Amino acid sequence: DHAGPMAAPPAGAPSASPLPGTAAHLAASCSDLQALRHAMERFEGLPLKQAASSTVFGDGNPEAAVMCIGEAPGQEEDRRGLPFVGPSGRLLDRMLASIGLDRTTCYISNVVPWRPPANRKPTPDEVAVCMPFLTRHIELVDPQVLILLGGAAAAAVLAKADGINRLRGRWFEFNSPGLPRPVPALATFHPAYLLRTPEAKRDAWRDLLMIKRRMDAARH
């Protein structure tokens, strides 16, 4: 199906060498997370970054088997420089705790590391600019499972135009040439949506149980 403006070329597809200074060029040169953080902090290719107070890179354990990816930082995240530290973050912590995870046993990041003004949604172009950084981030963490929080994260990572109601509760695979194998990925509702729409928590719980079953099976 048509993936829309956020679609990435198929993994392994031939492409021209990225231009110096672009996210793709900077990301490709990074061999560890510290280098990637510095590259993102130096990046000047997105006006969104100039309005943000900080580059919100990641939080948690980069050696963990589970990586959670949200959409973009909010006001509190921008102020503190960490992802998911406001009300959404507190709910995310409770969601993770319900399946035996916390920030020592998972790693958390966002598709876009800079807060959009007035907490608006990132545009498709802004997401596309940031995707090389996110792809390299996933490659360097090399998780066993990806949890995609919300429709924007799911659409960006899976390169699918379907909304979250069609994408959630199903296993997909994230492929990239820099990964040793495809990574299973499951989308669920963003915690901010669950705060506004408590009736969706039942479906989110089903999604979390799917993740727990996958993790339990991997241990045996």
Image (cartoon, rainbow, N blue to C red):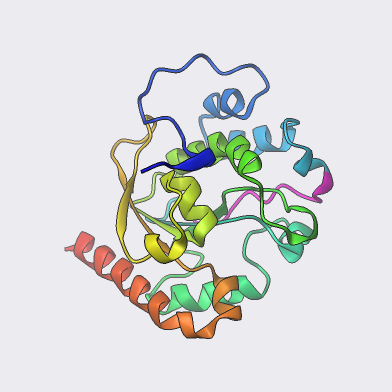
* Residue 83 shown left or right of residue 2 in the figure: right
Viewer-closest of 216 and 162: 162
Is 49 magenta? The answer is no
Residue 56: x %, y % from top left: 68, 51
Span highlighted in magenta in the image: 51-62
Residue 82: x %, y % from top left: 67, 58
Which residue does the image show at 51% across and 62% down from the upper left?
150
Seen as rendered, the residue at the extreme front is: 2
Q: Residue 137: tell me if it is visible.
A: no
Position of residue 81 relative to residue 95, above or below, is above
Position of residue 58 relative to residue 22, above or below, is below
Is 57 magenta? The answer is yes
Which residue does the image show at 55% across and 81% down from the upper left?
197
Seen as rendered, the residue at the extreme bottom is: 199
Residue 2, quarter of picture: top left
Residue 202, quarter of picture: bottom left
Residue 25: x %, y % from top left: 58, 22
Viewer-closest of 11 and 80: 11
Viewer-closest of 88 and 196: 196
Viewer-closest of 128 and 54: 128
Tell me the chief SS of the magenta region: loop
* Residue 87 shown left or right of residue 53 in the figure: left
Position of residue 189 relative to residue 147, above or below, is below
Which residue does the image show at 64% across and 39% down from the upper left?
125
Residue 147, quarter of picture: bottom left
Which residue does the image show at 38% across and 62% down from the upper left?
166
* Residue 114 shown left or right of residue 96 in the figure: right
Placement of the N terminus among the 4 image quadrants: top left
Placement of the C terminus among the 4 image quadrants: bottom left
Q: Residue 79: tell me if it is visible.
A: yes
